[in-house]
């Protein structure tokens, strides 16, 4: 007898398409990505993980999944046929990854402190906070690139110059270590801060509007996993771990605790995103 | 002079930690000065050039992995080979096979690609589930019907059709089964063995299969029938079919039947067939008197735990005991309860656990209110408000409308824990924690903070609360049973072996309080 495993998702991202033919794109110990025919990437994560805008959270047997297996999304059900896996989405809560509104003048100093105390010595944090000398010529090159790019990005952000912002971001996209390169994580955090500021700053809202399409084009310069993240971010949709930090920064919660949880994402991905977040709240301050 | 060697690994996705570890490992190899494993994006290629590592990566794209090593020329090929060895679990073969496979869009198509399949699992909205189940039956497939909201009339129609075709309909609303060792829907990972179970109760099946596993034995098959199967109108069609199949199954030595109280004439029919099964049958019809149920070849028991223990004893050639109930092992030190604290508050995710608890607690303490009332207990007037001893099935439809089941989503329970802790009459909070496929992957991460908050809130008002629970799970379940048990025990929860033992322990603690 062939038996199909029926699982139940406990959350489904608001940006997960309701219907799509797809295939397994990549598989990890506690997650996998499903790529639709239109190039969207749906990430299936285990319940210990945070919610994602393009994510489905369930206890999938990831070890049974392999790159290239056919999948489909239809009728509130995700099927991965070759793995005999059916995930029922009908009872899942829908995750809307929007960020809380920041008050004017907020500088994210507590995020900076958490990064100084807890960020790994790789990725963007060491360059941004001059914590330790570079270990390799590659790290030196990364630091040099950031030293050149971030002040330009800060100026462009403060003057709401969308073209200049895109020029700076094009030097960061796909840059650095990690499955989702550090530069991509940084951009996601930066955009989270801008979305948070945009709720009370029409100038930032206008900037984000102007950035949406170019960021979509920019995302073609990185891999599919980062691309989906960047596209969601351009639409104001973020992972739960990042929205938690924003919520605490804006609402007076436990910023350090939320930041520590975010820092656990990947090796340096969480830290890189928090660097971007802190930069987005106070570009001039952080870039100096 | 330093040389550089590059390897492009197409469409290779490794998590960031693995990439970092790979880079670090390569950097420590003899003769290697520096190494990097990065995605081959344009910016990373430029960055490598800026770092003095000019690499020829023609043809590489942003989704490819780039492995670069720099150092003594003679050492680099070995380093690259070491990197490739490190990238284990290549999946291209199975991926290509899957891409080549035709994707079935109907049961007929599925049968063409897997002609040996003999069972369909159906989970659609209730309005369509009956029709889909009938399609499957007409194709000669057994059916596990997970969907609920299928009418009793439709259930009868499906089950009669199945009976005439020598097939089985497991369900509707069948949430648990283990077929040929594969857990389906909400089920635990148990050892295979000589005990077959047929149950009209999801968590009842989970409790018995889990305890059988823990007692060192195993499960041949666990067949769910749906909760209405032993109603008068349905007549136990699926339980009788399951019983017949297990009687004929050479891998099954002992059969266990589980249900809430059946209609009397249905119970009689099932018991008559059980007595003719030719194998020992253990019966647990919750809420019925074992003495009235038992007969030659049929060993009747009062609790789910007793069903598991009796079945394992019989499978080992031992004589089963009439009851395995023992006085609870009381903790050496109890919390310092305030005078106002008197009552047990049971917050259940499993309906059958709640029902069994109501039966036992009603006998042991009295004054029990529940939304799954039993003979001897009172229906809870307001399910949101506890009264005296209260046992709430939080999986009841009134709680789950528009939100996931409490076995998946603990919010409802953690909120209720907080509310019970605020009540000066609450002395003991009784919980079930269900592990296995389908359930929350880390229940302790939800319960431990809730327990701690409840304790703090009660303490601020000069009270202490005892937490008692049972974890329905096995060592092989995906949630890591040992870690869950440790976390909950560390948080001060008194963890019992079974639901029945947890109830007796809660009752034991409550009975020490001044009334």
Image (spheres, coloured by chain):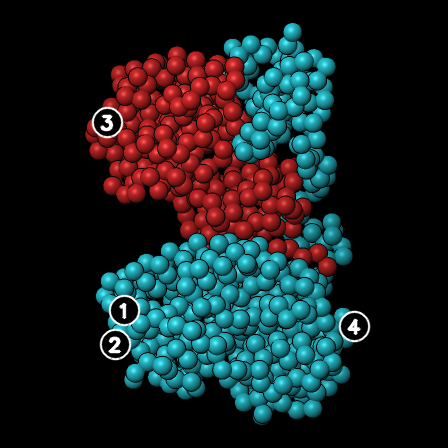
- Tags 1 and 3 both on a single chain: no
Classify residue B295 by image quadrant: bottom right
Mark toward the viewer: 2 or 3: 2
Q: Residue furthest top?
A: B1
Question: Judging from the image, what is the letter of the chain drawn in cyan?
Answer: B
Q: Secondary structure at mark 2?
A: loop
Relative image position of residue B136 (x, y in whole percent)? 66, 61
Quadrant position of the N terminus of chain B in the picture: top right
Residue located at (36% from left, 41% from top): A258
- Residue at mark 2: chain: B
Instruction: Determine crowd level at label 4: few under 14, some 14-19, many 20+ residues with C-alpha closer than 10 A.
Output: few
Q: Which residue is mark 4?
A: B250
Circles 1, 2 touching at the beta carbon (< 8 Å): yes
Q: Secondary structure at mark 4?
A: loop
Q: Are marks 4 and 1 in contact (CB under 8 Å)?
A: no
Q: Determine if marks 4 and 3 fall on one subunit.
A: no
**In the figure, residue B454 lies in which quadrant?**
bottom left
Q: Residue furthest front?
A: B332
Q: Tell which circle, 1 or 2, labels the residue nearer the N-terminal end.
A: 2
| Callout 1 secondary element | loop
Q: Nearer the viewer, mark 1 or mark 3?
A: 1
Return the residue at label 1: B463
- Gap in angstroms between the C-alphas marked 1 and 2: 9 Å
Residue under the image location 46 percent in, 82 percent down: B360
In the picture, the disc for residue A202 is 3
Q: Earlier in the sequence, mark 2 or mark 4?
A: 4
Q: Which residue is mark 2?
A: B340
Q: Residues within 10 Å of mark 3 (few under 14, many from 20)?
A: few
């Amino acid at each position: 007898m062939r038996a199909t495993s029926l699982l139940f998702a406990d959350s489904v991202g608001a940006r997960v398409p309701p219907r799509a033919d797809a295939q397994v794109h990549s598989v990890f110990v506690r997650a996998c990505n499903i790529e639709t025919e239109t190039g969207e990437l749906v990430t299936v994560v285990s319940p210990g993980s945070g919610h994602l805008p393009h994510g489905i959270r369930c206890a999938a047997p990831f070890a049974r999944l392999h790159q290239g297996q056919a999948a489909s999304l239809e009728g509130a059900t995700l099927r991965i046929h070759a793995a005999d896996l059916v995930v029922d989405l009908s009872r899942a809560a829908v995750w809307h990854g929007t960020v809380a509104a920041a008050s004017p003048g907020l500088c994210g100093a507590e995020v900076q402190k958490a990064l100084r105390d807890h960020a790994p010595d790789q990725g963007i944090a060491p360059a941004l906070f001059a914590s330790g000398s570079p270990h390799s010529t590659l790290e030196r090159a990364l630091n040099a690139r950031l030293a050149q790019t971030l002040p330009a990005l800060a100026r462009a952000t403060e003057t709401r110059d969308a073209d200049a912002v895109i020029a700076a971001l094009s030097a960061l996209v796909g840059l650095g270590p990690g499955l989702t390169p550090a530069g991509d994580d940084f951009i996601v955090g930066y955009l989270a801060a801008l979305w948070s500021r945009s709720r009370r700053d029409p100038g930032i809202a206008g900037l984000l509007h102007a950035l949406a399409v170019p960021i979509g084009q920019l995302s073609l310069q990185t891999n599919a996993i980062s691309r989906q993240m960047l596209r969601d971010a351009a639409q104001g949709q973020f992972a739960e771990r990042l929205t938690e930090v924003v919520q605490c920064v804006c609402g007076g919660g436990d910023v350090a605790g939320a930041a520590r949880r975010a820092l656990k994402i990947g090796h340096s991905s969480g830290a890189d995103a928090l660097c971007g977040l802190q930069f987005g709240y106070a570009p001039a301050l952080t870039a100096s | 002079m330093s040389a550089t060697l590059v390897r492009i690994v197409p469409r290779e996705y490794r998590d960031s930690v693995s990439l970092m570890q790979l880079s670090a490992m390569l950097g420590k190899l003899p003769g290697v000065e520096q190494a990097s494993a990065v995605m081959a994006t344009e910016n990373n290629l430029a960055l490598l050039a800026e770092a003095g590592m000019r690499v020829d990566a023609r043809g590489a794209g942003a989704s490819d992995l780039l492995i670069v090593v720099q150092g003594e020329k003679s050492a680099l090929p070995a380093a690259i080979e070491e990197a490739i060895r490190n990238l284990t679990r290549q999946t291209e073969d199975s991926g290509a096979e899957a891409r080549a496979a035709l994707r079935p869009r109907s049961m007929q198509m599925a049968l063409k690609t897997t002609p040996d399949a003999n069972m369909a699992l159906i989970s659609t909205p209730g309005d369509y589930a009956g029709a889909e189940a009938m399609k499957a039956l007409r194709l000669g497939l057994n059916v596990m019907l997970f969907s609920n909201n299928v009418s009793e009339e439709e259930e009868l129609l499906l089950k009669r059709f199945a009976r005439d075709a020598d097939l089985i309909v497991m369900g509707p609303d069948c949430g648990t089964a283990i077929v040929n060792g594969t857990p389906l829907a909400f089920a635990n990972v148990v050892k295979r063995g000589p005990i077959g179970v047929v149950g009209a109760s999801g968590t009842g099946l989970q409790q018995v299969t889990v305890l059988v596993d823990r007692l060192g034995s195993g499960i041949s098959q666990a067949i769910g029938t749906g909760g209405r199967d032993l109603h008068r109108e349905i007549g136990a069609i699926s339980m009788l079919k399951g019983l017949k199949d297990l009687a004929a199954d050479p891998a099954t030595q002992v059969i266990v039947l589980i249900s809430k109280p059946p209609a009397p004439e249905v119970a009689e029919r099932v018991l008559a067939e059980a007595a003719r099964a030719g194998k020992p049958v253990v019966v647990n019809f919750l809420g019925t008197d074992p003495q009235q149920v038992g007969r030659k070849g049929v060993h009747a028991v009062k609790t789910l735990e007793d069903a598991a223990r009796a079945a394992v004893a019989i499978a080992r050639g031992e004589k089963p005991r009439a009851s395995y109930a023992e006085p609870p092992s009381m903790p050496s030190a109890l919390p310092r309860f305030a005078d106002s604290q008197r009552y047990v508050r049971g917050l259940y995710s499993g309906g059958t656990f709640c029902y069994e608890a109501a039966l036992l607690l009603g006998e042991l303490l009295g004054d029990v209110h529940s939304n799954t009332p039993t003979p001897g207990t009172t229906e809870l007037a307001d399910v949101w408000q506890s009264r005296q001893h209260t046992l709430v099935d939080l999986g009841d439809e009134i709680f789950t409308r528009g939100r996931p089941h409490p076995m998946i989503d603990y919010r409802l329970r953690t909120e209720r824990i907080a509310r019970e802790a605020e009540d000066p009459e609450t002395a003991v909070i009784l919980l079930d924690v269900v592990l296995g496929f389908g359930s929350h992957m880390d229940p302790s991460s939800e319960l431990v903070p809730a327990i701690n908050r409840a304790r703090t809130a009660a303490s601020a008002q000069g009270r202490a609360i005892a937490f008692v629970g049972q974890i329905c799970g096995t060592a092989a379940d995906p949630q890591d049973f040992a870690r869950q048990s440790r976390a909950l025990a560390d948080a001060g929860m008194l963890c019992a072996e079974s639901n029945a033992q947890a109830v007796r322990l809660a009752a034991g603690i409550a009975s020490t309080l001044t009334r």
